[in-house]
Image (spheres, helix red, strand yellow):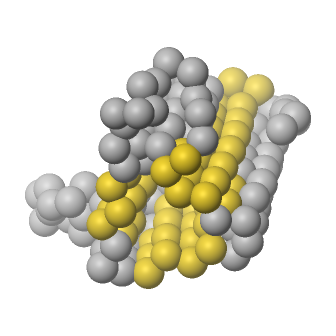
């Protein structure tokens, strides 16, 4: 497990500060890389499958549960959270997030509570994925809110 190291262009890694706020549980199911400046806040449970890569300056906030499958790559400045952190209109503020295997999440994308990204999904840069989106394996999603723009896609690590 590598946390807080690595090099990514466009960042001043010497001044970039990460956060490890984990009163909950983090499970590493194999090797993982979490680059500098990444903020992890885990009051619930975070599960990272083997060979997960989280690029610089990303944020993951798990108050319930976030599961990230094997060989998934998360680009820089990505936000993944399973809660609104407060109730809106009396609704439950949190729902688990499920990210399958070999998922690619582009730079500055946002994955919100209740989102489900099946294996092979590609999330385009700056997209916002919500729980309302119906995604199949190997779909490309883009936009805010995200929508499926292509099916049957693949990517190379």
Decide which of 118, 110 is in the foreground and name it.
110
Q: Residue 142: in sight, yes or no?
A: no
Residue at 55% across, 47% down: 5
Q: Is residue 50 above or below residue 74?
A: below
Residue 152 location (% of width, % of height): 87, 35
Residue 123: % across, % down: 63, 34
The residue depicted at 56 percent of the width and 52 percent of the height is: 34
Q: What residue is rendered at 15% in x and 60% in y?
A: 86
Q: Is residue 14 visible?
A: yes
Q: Is residue 15 above or below residue 61?
A: above
Farthest residue, direction top: 10
- In the image, what residue occupies the spot 71% across and 51% down? 72
Query: From this viewpoint, which residue is outermost toward the front?
Result: 14
Quarter of the image with the N terminus in it: bottom right
* Residue 149 image-quadrant placement: top right
Q: Is residue 108 left or right of residue 121?
A: left
Residue 23 vs 121, above or below: the answer is below
**Residue 56 horizontal/vertical position (percent):** 50, 38
Question: Which of the pair 91/123 is nearer the observer?
Answer: 123
Query: In the image, 110: left or right of 73?
Result: left
């Amino acid at each position: 497990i590598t946390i807080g190291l690595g090099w990514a262009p466009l960042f001043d890694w010497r001044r970039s500060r990460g956060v490890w706020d984990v009163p909950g549980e983090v499970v590493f199911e194999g090797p993982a890389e979490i680059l500098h400046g990444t903020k992890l806040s885990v009051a619930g449970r975070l599960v990272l499958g083997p060979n997960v890569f989280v690029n610089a300056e990303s944020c993951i906030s798990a108050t319930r549960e976030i599961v990230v499958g094997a060989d998934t790559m998360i680009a820089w400045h990505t936000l993944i959270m399973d809660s609104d952190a407060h109730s809106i209109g009396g609704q439950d503020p949190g729902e688990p997030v499920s990210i399958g295997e070999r998922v690619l999440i582009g730079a500055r994308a946002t994955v919100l509570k209740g989102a489900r990204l099946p294996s092979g999904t590609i999330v385009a840069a700056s997209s916002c994925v919500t729980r309302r989106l119906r995604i199949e394996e190997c779909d490309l999603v883009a936009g805010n809110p995200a929508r499926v723009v292509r099916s049957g896609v693949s990517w190379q690590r």
